[in-house]
Image (cartoon, rainbow, N blue to C red):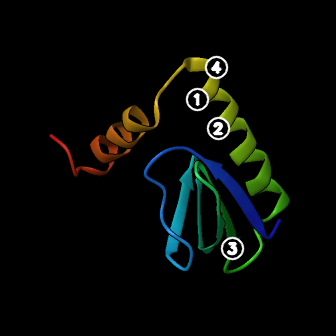
Amino acid sequence: MEGARLEGTDLPTVGRDVVLKCGPVDAFGTVIWATSSRRGIRFDKPISARELVALRDASVSVEQAGITPDELEAMADWASGLAR
């Protein structure tokens, strides 16, 4: 897989370098298109089938749990030691 479509608020602008972090996957890429609430990212290198499955599993788990993007970011900050 060579890219992803994101949906949300406060997303980066076209041309920005990004890191997509979801579950066990960290994928580096660049935002290549934008609409009001969506962005398209082209990964620097394609992700593997295993990473694709992990991304899908993580996104479904988060959606089913009703976790907001802000809550997810706070959880990641806590896990990495950025928040106390």
Count all numbered tags in the image, as a single digit. Answer: 4
Question: Dot 1: what SS?
Answer: helix
Q: Residue at x 23, y 49 (%)?
A: 81
Question: Dot 2: what SS?
Answer: helix
**Earlier-in-chain disc, 4 versus 2:** 2
Mark number displayed over residue 62: 1
Question: Dot 3: what SS?
Answer: strand
Amino acid beneath label 4: Gln
Q: Is residue 71 above or below residue 82?
A: above
What percent of the width, then of the height, locates residue 26? 56, 62
Q: Nearer the viewer, mark 4 or mark 2?
A: 4
**Picture quarter with the C terminus:** top left
Q: Residues within 10 Å of mark 4 (few under 14, many from 20)?
A: few
Q: Is residue 75 above or below residue 36?
A: above
The answer for how far apart the CA atoms under marks 3 and 4 are is 26 Å
Q: Is residue 36 left or right of residue 41?
A: left
